[in-house]
Amino acid sequence: MKKKQKYFCKFHSQLDLPFLETSNESLKEIFQILELEFGLKRNSNQKLVDLGAGNGNIVIFSALYYGIKSYGIEIDQSLIKEAKKRIKSLKKKGNFDNRLFRKIKIKFGDFYLHNLKKYDFIYIFSLPPMQKYLEHVFSTAKRGAVIISHKFQLSELNSFLKYEYTLTYKKNKQEIFTFLYRKVS
Ligand SMILES: C[S@@+](CC[C@H](N)C(=O)[O-])C[C@H]1O[C@@H](n2cnc3c(N)ncnc32)[C@H](O)[C@@H]1O
């Protein structure tokens, strides 16, 4: 992608979907339920992708605590830099097996152009107005893939995503939801 094009894509995406972080508390609950109810197997070859990886929070968590292959697609280079810095500093601390860090891949890219067929788990924290534009993206996911949508339902994609579960938790007296779906056709 040319430099000007890159800046345009970043600018446009930031209007649609700014950086907001999924908290670690939420992540713990989400991964617990993925393991208990949705077939997540620790230290397996399963693959997770975070569409809009931000500072890498999700992919770092899934690789280091669950040992699965974790891919992040992010359009903002400064967030990718931040994620890489975090990974480096965690590596330096030496609290995790070095092999786990090899399971993290964060790439610059536009998730509207990403093919999802290789992933078992697809994570997204998007905003409702953009969901109708995601149909062609989710249509590439394989049958049986689990889609995790943080905070907002994916109600526009009912034709091929089957709703399966809502996780509810409280943060500062506010209720937060995560919705889980399965790709069915
Ligand atoms: C709400 S944040 C979620 C960050 C992270 N997934 C989390 O839950 O902590 C959405 C992220 O998507 C990125 N983003 C927005 N549009 C994008 C696009 N078209 N392709 C890739 N990333 C995008 C933003 O830069 C931002 O970091």
Image: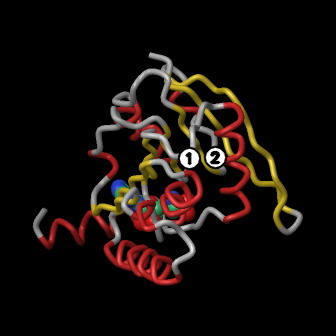
User: Does residue 66 appear to the left or right of 54 in the view shown?
Assistant: right
User: Does residue 142 appear to the left or right of 172 in the view shown?
Assistant: left
- Can you name the residue that lies furthest to the top here? 185
- Vertical placement of 13 versus 3: above or below? above
Q: Nearer the viewer, residue 106 or 90?
A: 90
Name the element at disc 1: helix
User: Does residue 133 appear to the left or right of 5 in the view shown?
Assistant: right
- Vertical placement of 119 versus 178: above or below? above
Which of the image's four quarters has the C terminus?
A: top left
- Does ligand 1 reach within 8 Å of label 2's beta carbon? no
Q: Position of residue 2 (x, y in %)?
A: 10, 67
Q: Quadrant of residue 27?
A: bottom right
Amino acid at circle 2? Phe
Give the spatial CA distance, label 1 vs label 2: 7 Å
- Vertical placement of 118 versus 11: above or below? above
Disc 1 versus disc 2: nearer the observer:
2
Which of the image's four quarters has the N terminus?
A: bottom left
The reply to whether residue 15 is in sight is: no
Name the element at disc 2: loop
Residue indicated by mark 1: 128
The number of discs equals 2
Contact (Cβ within 8 Å) of mark 1 with mark 2: yes
The reply to whether residue 114 is in sight is: yes
Residue indicated by mark 2: 152
Q: Quadrant of residue 7?
A: bottom left
- Can you name the residue that lies furthest to the right here? 173
Q: Residue at x 63, y 40 (%)?
A: 153
Q: Quadrant of residue 158?
A: top right
Label 1, residues with CA under 10 Å away: few <14, some 14-19, many ≥20: some
